[in-house]
Image (cartoon, rainbow, N blue to C red):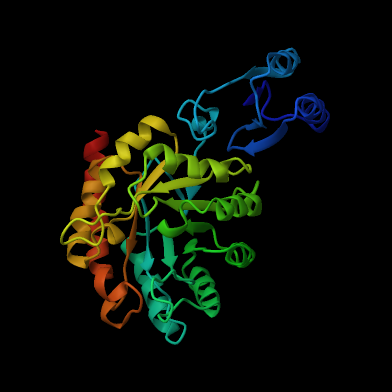
Amino acid sequence: MILPKSSHLNPEQLAEVTAIVTEFGCKIQPIIGAVRTIYAIVGDERDELMINRIEGLDYIDRIDRIQSPFKLMDVRSDLANGRLTIGGVTLGEDLFVIAGQCTIDPKNPGYFYETAAAMKEAGAHVLRGGVWKPRTNPYTFQGDNKSLDILMEASRRTGLPVDTEVMEEEHVKLAIDAGVQVLQVGARNALNYSLLRAIGRAIGNRPQVSVLLKRSIHMGPLNEFISAAEYIAAFGNPNIMLCPRGTTPTLDGYRNHPDESITPLLKEKTWAAVVVDPSHSVGKASYVPSAALAAVAYGADGLCIESHIDPTKGIGDDPRQSITPDVLKKLICQAREFWRLRRA
């Protein structure tokens, strides 16, 4: 990882550095941060001659060589100095909340518009809305492209940025073109490396687009989780949030096995913000507030919560695990108290 003395390399400097690494079979990937740009060496960066030639340039501060399976996502990476701001909140400085419906019903858009307004009133910073839905049963509702228009109309009405799950390259393009600010990668695609690469290529150096990467549905190692994020960061966008959401095998009574306790373990390994999804973790509305508060107590930077203006009229998971806006508003107040106590 190359760190210049100034905030970024000028075109001539970048061309010179690129020419050097190309001789050794590598490439340069700029990663634009809030205050400076760093330059990842993509390929085998161990060649001492290549390193010496780059460090000998008078405009280069240093090269950090991190011996880790995830060099960019590693807590020692210079990317740790960056800050991710979404919806007016800088993650790590205040509690961050994503909230909204599991699934947008294209036949009843009014429910989503009402939910969106209620999410803003409750204190959410980003509006969640499922446009495309992964389903175990091929005959159940899989989502509808028309729901993307509803999602963006709700964003315009409320002024809130939006989060939606993408499952294939076409979804990624449609979402970005529509103006979706947070692309969500679900548990079933968390290790779909082709999709992660496609997302990385698509968002590239777009600072306005972030990725909420959920943990794989199976209880995989933490390094595997962080390495999945590395696929996205390697294409130049460090705006990544890691999202524990419960794993299998399930814990009796819960939808999954709650895993908010991995938050401090993640923070020892990576600089990425941790945004926990308690809704999918426990799978029952009455359990969500306790699970959310536990996540904050463990050190989560934010929460991703399913909420619906009238869960009984929702589709997808909403009838079972969405909380009402009133419950959400109370929960956000309580979670902020936990946040302040933990940081006192």
Residue 264 point in image, percent of width and height: 30, 35
Relative to residue 319, is residue 253 depicted above or below?
A: above
User: Can residue 197 be spotted in the picture?
Assistant: yes
Residue at 21 percent across and 66 percent down: it is 284
Residue 33 placement: quadrant = top right
Front residue (pair 139, 59): 139
Front residue (pair 177, 167): 167
User: Can residue 84 be spotted in the picture?
Assistant: no
Would you say 140 lies left or right of 10 here?
left
Residue 253 point in image, percent of width and height: 16, 62
Residue at 53 percent across and 32 percent down: it is 79
Front residue (pair 182, 253): 253
Relative to residue 272, is residue 174 depicted above or below?
A: below
Front residue (pair 142, 73): 142
Relative to residue 118, is residue 5 depicted above or below?
A: above
Residue at 63 percent across and 38 percent down: it is 32
- In the picture as drawn, the residue positioned furthest to the bottom comes out as 107
Quarter of the image with the N terminus is top right
Relative to residue 143, is residue 282 depicted above or below?
A: above
Residue 129 placement: quadrant = bottom left
Residue 95 point in image, percent of width and height: 34, 47
Residue at 59 percent across and 62 percent down: it is 172
Would you say 262 lies left or right of 43 here?
left
Quarter of the image with the C terminus is top left
Number of numbered markers? 0
